[in-house]
Amino acid sequence: GGRGANQVSDDYRYQDGNYEGYAPSDGYYHGGDEPAHEEDAQSDVTEGHDEDDEVYEGEYQGIPHPDDIKEKQKKRAPAVADEYRDRADLMAERMEDEEQLAHQYENIIEECGHGRFQWTLFFVLGLALMADGVEVFVVGFVLPSAEKDMCLSSSNKGMLGLIVYLGMMVGAVMLGGLADKLGRKKCLIISLAINAAFAFLSSFVQGYGFFLFCRLISGLGIGGSLPIVFAYFSEFLSREKRGEHLSWLCMFWMIGGIFASAMAWSIIPHYGWGFSMGTKYHFHSWRVFVLVCSLPCIASLVALKFMPESPRFLLEIGKHDEAWMILKHVHDTNMRAKGEPERVFTVSYIKTPKQVDEFIEIQSSTGTWYQRWLVRIRTTFKQVWDNVLYCLTAQYRMNTLMLAVVWFTMALSYYGLIVWFPDMIRYLQEEAYESRVKIFDEEEVSHFTFNFTLENQIHRNGEYRNDKFIGMKFKEVRFEDSLFEECYFEDVTSSETFFENCTIISTVFYNTDLYEHKFINCRLINSTFLKEKEGCHLDFEEDNDFLIYLVSFLGSLSVLPGNIISALLMDKIGRIKMIGGSMLISAVCCFFLFFGNSESAMIGWQCLFCGASIAAWNALDVITVELYPTDKRATAFGILNGLCKFGAILGNSIFASFVGITKVVPILLASSALVGGGLLALRLPETREQVLM
């Protein structure tokens, strides 16, 4: 048994002999001086007597042995020398250490195996990624209801749609950078906690300004989770498993979209699912939906408390023993699940890179508490900023710039079209709705009581005398050049209803929402408005809501084949071919949108486009993780993902402005962006064969 353990140890021993990767057969932990102690022990056992065992004549006089003095001087020498060495030399030594660590860590992860621990972490981080997918869809689903509940203007609606992406952009850069300094687990917990708290709070606030603020901070939190999730999970995966399992992880974004669509479909149309407190506070069904959408984030936050920090990150900051214990836990968990609990974790010592950063420990007696915190915060953000600049140094500049262009072009086209598809479907529905309008000319009605709904009608040159409009609803109704004399309106609710060039004489409006702006160029003679309805009201259930939810549901579900194909082929054909091929195929799909002249055709082309483009997203996530070293990985991912969200903001704004005007500009813009990004992606380096640095 001892010979077998020694043989395994020899197989994993690093080539240049700088360190021993695995433990001797005695099963005890040994430090970096293990070989020297082992030689002394063997010498004592075999010979029974050694010159070192002789009593030094000055020992009883308290005089140190000359050999002990030399040994202490050797140990002190490097620490003293580091103070005077050039920073470039220290960085060169650190890079050499990191290269050695990268190869040893790969061997250790292979020994730990891929099993129960990775799958548990897979589902925990998957819930966090699912929360990100939900966040993208939430505002789009609640906007039709929220605009009436909070009296939103067109500009307010546009701002609410973009504010989430703005928060995500800031959060990705800020929290991604902090994850390389404070740790993956800690920053992911902070990120999810921010998102859960403000998403929960946003479901209860009534004012538009506070709701906007809550969604901004909620987006900031969930935006920071995306770069951390991929960096975190990749550091528990071996080279052979990394591309495939990171692609499987991406499926949770799709699951988030499906979850949001299903919940919106089942909750929002039920207007009665809520409560009111007086006349000022209303909790409608769309707020219940916002509340339910925070559940994946909360679940991930709770589960994450039971997961360990990334051992790769701990090794980067010199915490050897903590990293070793976590790796042993991973090994033992997987071996027990495989039915091999007797398998021993053979690693005894792991290479840790030379620590170059200068951390200043501030004593509790130094200054006030807020001054100490201010120094710590400034120091941390300076380190994050240095990491950002490092991604633009000569070694990584070209890769960073090319990845930035690919991320941006992909986001511009994808998020732009994702917004454009539902808007185009709404536009086609509105055209069909307007084509069914009923027109009434020169009608005369007197002494009649209207107590039913009037919808999609135009009344011209009519005369209404002594009529009553009680407890009724107007939807898409216009009165043009008409006369109302001695009429009575009570408890009337209206939507998109206007009076143009009308004459209104001796008429009473009681408890209605027929406000002043709904009377355009009208003459009101001796008319009275009493007890107008306050606020905005959800007057009608929109008939096209069902179709919009269905479109989003099918769009999310359509990426399933692309996810499966990309996961199975990621490690076979490589990341570069996956990105380039997927983006070029997506560009071809865009041209078929010229033939989308009906709702069903638009839905079909949307599903095809989403299914083709998802492989590029998955490969982008994988290659971004693999191109950067551990201490810069989350920072680089955060920068690129932040740029992606900036592309999403531009795409939403540009593409939405052409709805109902022309299809040529959005289609050509999306296609050309995808072609340019796809061709540029082919110039990126392939990373499937390299270890994580």
Image: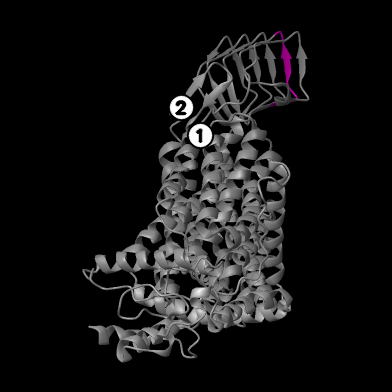
Q: Is residue 257 magenta?
A: no
Residue 502 is inside the magenta segment: yes
Any part of residue 667 in sight = no
Q: Which label sits on residue 287?
A: 1
Location of mark 2 (residue): 274
> Main SS type for the magenta part?
strand
Q: Nearer the viewer, residue 313 or 367?
A: 367
Q: Judge from the rendering whether residue 206 lies leftward or rightward of residue 274; answer left or right.
A: right
**Residue depicted at x 50% and y 56%:** 185
The kind of secondary structure element at disc 1 is helix
Residue 212 can be seen, yes or no: yes
Residue 605: image location, x then y, percent: 50, 63
N-terminal-most mark, 1 or 2: 2
671 w.r.t. 507: above or below: below
Frontmost residue, 49 versus 84 = 49
Amino acid type for the residue under numbered disc 2: Gly
The image shows residue 660 at horizontal and vertical percentages of: 65, 52
Q: Which residues are magenta?
A: 499-506
- The quadrant the N terminus occupies is bottom left
69 above or below 172? below
Q: Give the structural element (helix, strand or loop) at label 2.
A: loop
